[in-house]
Amino acid sequence: MATGLHAPFTVESIRAALTTQWLGRTLTLLPDVTSTNELALAAAQSGSPDGAVIVADRQTAGRGRLARAWESPAARNLYVSILIRRLPGGDRLGWLPLLAGTAAAAAIRILTPLSPSLKWPNDLLVRSRKVGGILSESQGIGTGDACAVLGIGLNVNWLPEEMPPELTPIATSLAAEMRTPVDRARLLARLLIELEQRVDQWRAGDLAGLTEEYRTHCGTIGQRVRIDVGGGGQLEGTVTGIEPDGSLRLHSGSGPFAQDRLVHTGDVTHLRPA
C-alpha cells in the first residue's frame, strides 16, 4: 500500500479513514479551483447541508485573512473548506477559527511526532514557522439562512526548495519538519473528526472546555506582541490570556500607566519567537 507522498488522495481514501457522524458526509474533491471558500459559500446558497466539505488539490486564488494570497501548489498540501450551519447565538461565532486551529493541531499531534502551537487567532506554527492557517467567513448573519465557512490550509508535503524564496524564512511544512511525507487523506480525515468534536462542543455551549484547550496550546500567551487592529492602528503589549469569548487579553504600559484591554480581532506579530 502506498504511503506518504504517493498515497492516494481520493474521495474513497478520505472516506476510508473518516468516522464522523455529520461532518464530511457530503464531500467534494476537485483537482483545481480558484478558492475552496468561494465554492463553499456558493454551495451554501445552493442548499448544501451542514458539514459539507469541499477539498481541492490546487487553488489558483487561495485566500488567507486580510485578503492575503495563500500559496496553493498542486499535490502537496491540504486546502479544505467546511460549511457550518446551525450557528449558536451570542458572541460564539468568533470561536470558529480558534476551535478549527485546535482541531488541526490535534490532528497533527495524533498522526505525527510534531506538536504545533497556535498563534492567535488563526495560525499554526512549528518552530515559529507557519504550517497552517484558518479563514472563517460568514453570510446571512441575523437571518434564517445564516452560515459560516471554515477554510483550513495546511502545508503538508511542500518542501522548502519548492517554496517561493520569500516564504522559506517564515513557513514550513509537516514533511519538511519530519523529513518524511505525510498521507494527506488520513490527515484530512483526522482533521474532520477532530473538528466535528469541537463544533459539537461549541454548539452545546462548552466554551470552558474549548478555552482550556486553546490556552494549553496557544503560543501567543505570554508573548510580547504588536497587533494591527485596522485603520492604521496598532497595539503593543504582553498577552496575558484568552477570554471565554475567544478574545485576547493584552497588558500594556507599567506603573500608573498600566492597562489591560480585550482585543477581539487583529493581526498579531510575535516580537520574540514563540
Image (tube, helix red, strand yellow):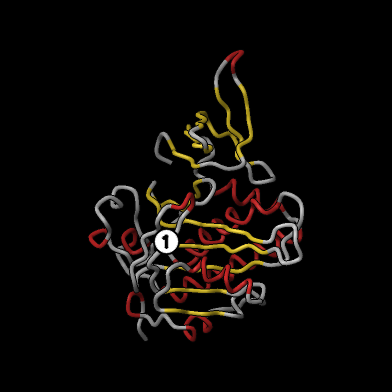
Residue position for label 1: 113
Residue 115, given in percent of the width and then of the height, sits at 46, 55
Q: Is residue 148 shown above or below 231? A: below
Q: Kindly identify the amino acid type of the residue bearing the numbered disc 1.
A: Pro
Between 259 and 230, the one nearer to me in the picture: 230
Residue 65, given in percent of the width and then of the height, sits at 49, 52
Residue at image coords 35%, 70%: 76
Residue at image coords 40%, 39%: 273
Residue 58: image quadrant is bottom left
Residue 264 placement, left or right of 220:
right
Q: Is residue 118 shown above or below 186? A: above
Q: Is residue 9 shown above or below 267? A: below
Extreme-top residue of the structure: 256
Residue 255: image quadrant is top right
Residue 75 placement, left or right of 28:
left
Residue 8: image quadrant is bottom left
Residue at image coords 51%, 57%: 134
Q: Residues within 10 Å of mark 1 (few under 14, many from 20)?
A: few
Residue 167, given in percent of the width and then of the height, sits at 30, 52
- Position of the N terminus, as image quadrant, is bottom left
